[in-house]
Image (tube, rainbow, N blue to C red):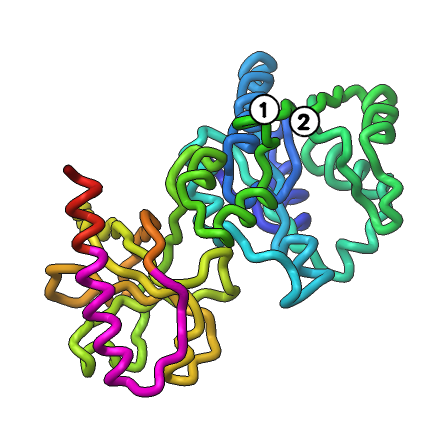
Amino acid sequence: MRLIRSLTNLKHFSQQPQASLANGCVATIGNFDGVHLGHQAIIDQVRERARALGVPSVVMVFEPQPREFFQGDDAPPRLMSFRQKFETLLNSGIDIVLCLRFDEKFRSYSGMGFIEDVLIRGLRVHHLVVGDDFRFGCDRAGDFALLRSMGDKHGFSVENTRTVEVAGDRVSSTRIRQLLGQNRLAAAEDLLGHRYRIRGRVVHGQRLGRQIGAPTANVMLPRMPALRGVYVVQVALADGRVLDGVANIGVRPTVDGKQPSLEVHLLDFTGTLYGQRIDVVFRHFLRDEVKFDSVDDLKHQIARDFDDARAWIDISTT
């Protein structure tokens, strides 16, 4: 799998004689936040058609996501970071991920300009898979009908995405965020096709956890995720071990924290994890994040969280 970042790099890549895009591609466009069951169905569509045509499969995404560009901090929380998304697409069998920077220059593209520069000259697209409500271009004049019209003129076909429903609900990133916000982890898992998880690198924190007898692995988050509170988790370490733990996700109000963070307390673990990438799987909601009157009160509550987590783990494994 290859990652191409920026339209400039795409143009350079597609002009190389050995480029895999020389004979065109089958592509899809979207945020792919969460890479849920609906996204997986689209990926299957793209891979199947690419295999039939003998060309690469391409997923086009944007950084930041368009709603983040327009709404800033008011944009919906992400289900996964770009790196986690890329790794998930890599495992799905997609050949190329094209990541275009969504900035002021890019948003000024007209619908026709996007089709001509990105789809035709850049990707040399043979077949495009998008939703029939897909809109693009600075004037939002770009739509499914325009793609079909331009495809007829320039020799590429356009196909609607397959709709996926679970228990009568359309699978969408918005619905999954709602479920996670309600701490309905099992229902979110049904739409994702896997347990909700956050991957990240362990960084140095304030070392407060060691002072209160609960050493933590700290993962900094660029944005507040859909979850907030204290959870029973399973953590996959770089060496392959999978350990139980308790995680707090939020802003640490007791110590006047402001930056969103994920703090993971591993049960029955000694050692350091600084610099390692860990995979934190959320299994069960314990309580909301609250501000305690003192660090001692926080310490006592963490001890109770550990007891509650062990009790839940014992029940869930019997």
Q: Which residue is mark 1?
A: 46
Which element type, helix, strand or loop, lies under badge 2? strand
* Left/right of residue 229 with respect to residue 115 in the rendered view: left
Q: Residue at x 53, y 23 (%)?
A: 44
Q: Residue at x 40, y 79 (%)?
A: 291
Locate residue 217: give its quadrant.
Answer: bottom left
Q: Do we see residue 19 in this rendering? A: no
Q: Which mark is residue 129?
A: 2
Residue 32 lies, in percent from the top left, at 57, 41
| Residue type pointed to by label 2 | Val
Q: Do we see residue 101 in this rendering? A: yes
Query: Is residue 182 found inside the magenta-colored segment of the image?
Result: no
- Reply above or below: 76 against 170: below
Look at the image and give the residue range highlighted in magenta: 287-309
Residue 209 lies, in percent from the top left, at 23, 76
* Left/right of residue 54 with respect to residue 312 in the rendered view: right
Which element type, helix, strand or loop, lies under badge 1? helix
Residue 142 lies, in percent from the top left, at 84, 39
Circle 1/circle 2 CB separation < 8 Å: yes
Q: Which mark is residue 286?
A: none
Which residue sits furthest bottom? 294
Q: Viewer-proximal residue, 300 or 11? A: 300
- Dot 1 crowding, Cα within 10 Å, few <14, some 14–19, many 20+: many
